[in-house]
Amino acid sequence: MRMTPQRQLVLDALLQLEQATPEQVCQHVQRATPSVNITTIYRTLELLEDLGIVRHTHLGHGAPNYSVHEHQHVHLVCHRCDKVVEAPRDVMDDLRGTLRVRFGFALDASHLALSGLCADCQEATE
């Protein structure tokens, strides 16, 4: 695969932003190259993911978040206030073991977001 200038711009944006939606990547890229459009960003992110260079995670109902680096945490997303808490991946160890034993399934916890209610929203409902 040839590294085009647009692909390099998208990759550089993700390296600088660390984690971003396609729209955030587009805004970042357009600062340097205004002619790059959102369609190019989406296509490039899809290609880079197919090549194993970037990964995405869905954090709630919005657009996916892309990252170059493998997440060392699990995202806990409050579906009421949209707060995102990063928990260490080892919190998934028991579930990972259960899934392997019962279903022969290998969980990739670096690509995971769990939704529920954060502590503040739980308190507000009590």
Image (spheres, rainbow, N blue to C red):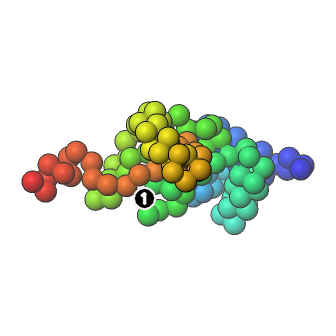
Spot occupied by residue 16 in the image (x, y as percentages of width and height): 61, 37
Residue at point 73%, 62% (across, down): 43
Which of these two is toward me, 92 or 54? 92
Percent x, y for residue 108?
57, 45
Which residue shows up at 37% across the image and 51% down it?
77
Does residue 70 appear in the picture of this structure? yes
Q: Residue at x 33, y 58 (%)?
A: 79
Which residue is at a point 71% across and 52% down the rendered structure image?
A: 49
Kind of element beneath mark 1: loop
Count of marks placed on residues: 1
What amino acid type should be assigned to the residue bearing mark 1?
Answer: Gly
Image quadrant in which you'd find residue 12: top right
* x and y, in percent, of residue 37 in the image: 69, 63
Q: Tell me if residue 33 comes above or below residue 69 in the rendering.
A: below
The residue pinned by badge 1 equals 60
Disc 1 residue crowd, few under 14, some 14–19, many 20+, Cα 10 Å: many
Question: Up-down: is 103 above or below 70?
Answer: below
In the drawing, does residue 6 fall left or right of residue 59?
A: right
> Which residue occupies the extreme right position in the image?
2
Q: Is the residue 24 above or below the residue 72 in the image?
A: below
Q: Quadrant of residue 67?
A: top right
Q: Nearer the viewer, residue 22 or 119?
A: 119
Residue 91 left/right relative to 71:
left
For the view shown, which residue lies furthest in the bottom direction?
39
The single residue placed furthest to the left in the displayed view is 126
Q: In the image, residue 45 lies at what x, y percent?
A: 69, 55
46 horizontally vs 73: left or right: right
